[in-house]
Amino acid sequence: MAKIKVLIADDIMILRQGLKAVLEQDEEIEVVSLAQNGKEAFEKCKIHRPDVVLMDMRMPDYDGAFGIRSIKENCPGIKVLVLTTFDDDETIEKAVQSGADGYILKELEDAKVISSVKSVYDGMSIFGSRIYQVMKSKMDQPAAAAPVDTGIAEELTDREKDVLRLVAKGYDNKEISAELYLAEGTVRNLVSRLLEKLDRKDRTQLAIYAVKHGLDE
């Protein structure tokens, strides 16, 4: 079985090494390279072609936002999971706007960091509750003045709306399955159908759509 290839970008060497040791506790993960800023992360992505980049946001010279944008524009198949100590509005918004597939904090337990990497690799968008609240507050401002989408939104079934609401809250497929008493395969199919119906590329865009159109409550 092929391992999940991970690249770690952090400006502090001991943290890079520490994260490498944490991730490689799991036999399904291989750390293929380390980088000290966003530019180096991008350059090494072109060489090593990782599946997932674990990206810090605040780094000297070229920050995480630079790295995320460069990777997404030139290597769109690579997932980027932000792992940082900062959860202020500006940093979160910058990461999301740059195209991050997930955003978690360094205070997480090792096992949760590992599971987040695997989830992002599997195509899920991972955002902690704090990050979700920031995204929601940003989207609420224009949403208050904008009418709820009465076109496509009305074409969604009640079950699809339930799934969309939970995606917006950051639930993964397993959590949605437990919440709605559905098989995980059914949840995967519903998420795929939502992506197609709403013409969205990933779960992050689904979450933003839900918040923007008042479908997250």
Image (cartoon, rainbow, N blue to C red):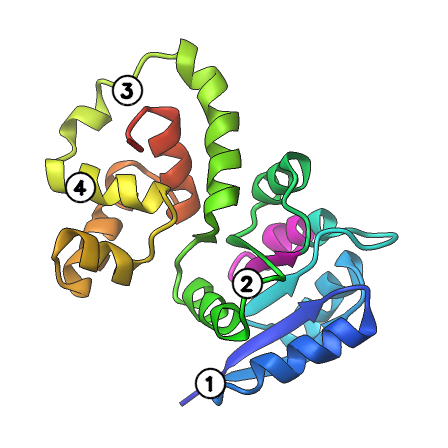
Secondary structure under the numbered disc 3 in the rendered image: loop
**Residue 85 at what x, y percent from top left?**
68, 55
Q: Quadrant of residue 165?
A: top left
Q: Quadrant of residue 17?
A: bottom right
The alpha-carbon separation of the residues under discs 2 and 1 comes to 17 Å
Residue span colored magenta? 68-84
The alpha-carbon separation of the residues under discs 2 and 3 comes to 32 Å
Q: Is residue 79 magenta?
A: yes
Furthest residue toward top: 145
Question: Where is mark 3, residue-wise?
Answer: 149
Mark number, residue 52: none
Mark number, residue 160: 4
Mark number, residue 28: 1
Name which residue type carries label 1. Glu
Task: Look at the picture and state if 41 lies above or below 87.
Answer: below
The alpha-carbon separation of the residues under discs 4 and 1 comes to 32 Å
Q: Residue at x 62, y 43 (%)?
A: 98
Decide: few, some or many residues near mark 2? Use Cα within 10 Å; few <14, some 14-19, many ≥20: many
Contact (Cβ within 8 Å) of mark 2 with mark 3: no
Question: Where is mark 2, residue-wise?
Answer: 78
Q: Earlier in the sequence, mark 2 or mark 3?
A: 2
Q: Residue at x 51, y 53 (%)?
A: 101
Q: Earlier in the sequence, mark 2 or mark 4?
A: 2
**Residue 55 at what x, y percent from top left?**
66, 60
Name which residue type carries label 2. Ile
Query: Does residue 193 appear in this view?
Result: yes
In the image, taking residue 150 as reference, residue 140 lies left or right, namely: right
